[in-house]
Amino acid sequence: MDAMLILIDSDAELERARALVERLWESDDPADVARLQTQARLIATYEESKWPPRPASTAALIRHLMDQHGVTRAEMVPILGTPSRVSEVLSGKKELSMAMVQRLRARFRVSADVLIPPPRKVPTRRSSRRAAA
């Protein structure tokens, strides 16, 4: 199959590129396989630039862990404190204490690094005063 690669900088070109991938998918020709791989990378690059992945919130991560381990909200009370605290943490209204992080880490066997959100950037203020000479 003779096909060119499509450089993607619009949604219309994205659709053309996806159609090309569909056509190349059935080919066994090594040149077409190479085109398919390259076009797929171009599509992924465009999609990631247009829709960058957002890191999951701590609350979403905990809900995922609960789902994966079959843990109910009631079973989270000893880990997070009280039923209302469980609700606050799972809704994202309350951040985790270090004690909660330790208990979650022990219960779900995950690194504490994934449970502690990155520090928030604090805007720095420039001083308008000049240093005295």
Image (tube, grey):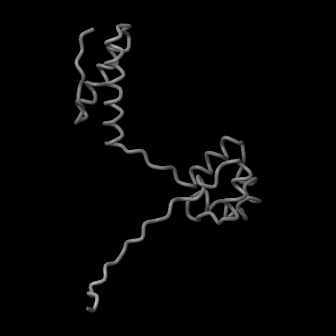
Going by the picture, which residue comes out furthest to the front?
133
User: 67 or 49, which lies in front?
Assistant: 49
> Image check: 44 left or right of 83?
left
> Image check: 104 left or right of 119?
right
* Quadrant of residue 7 within the rendered picture: top left
Residue 31 lies, in percent from the top left, at 31, 12
* Quadrant of residue 113 within the rendered picture: bottom right
Question: Image height check: is 111 above or below 121?
Answer: above
Residue 12 lies, in percent from the top left, at 23, 31
The residue sitting at 58% across, 49% down in the picture is 61
How many discs mark residues in the rendered view? 0
Question: Image height check: is 43 above or below 29?
Answer: below
Q: Quadrant of the C terminus?
A: bottom left
Q: Quadrant of the N terminus?
A: top left
Residue 116 lies, in percent from the top left, at 58, 59
> Image check: 61 left or right of 130?
right
The residue sitting at 69% across, 62% down in the picture is 100
Question: Image height check: is 86 above or below 5?
Answer: below
The residue sitting at 63% across, 55% down in the picture is 112
Going by the picture, which residue comes out furthest to the bottom?
132
User: 82 or 80, which lies in front?
Assistant: 80
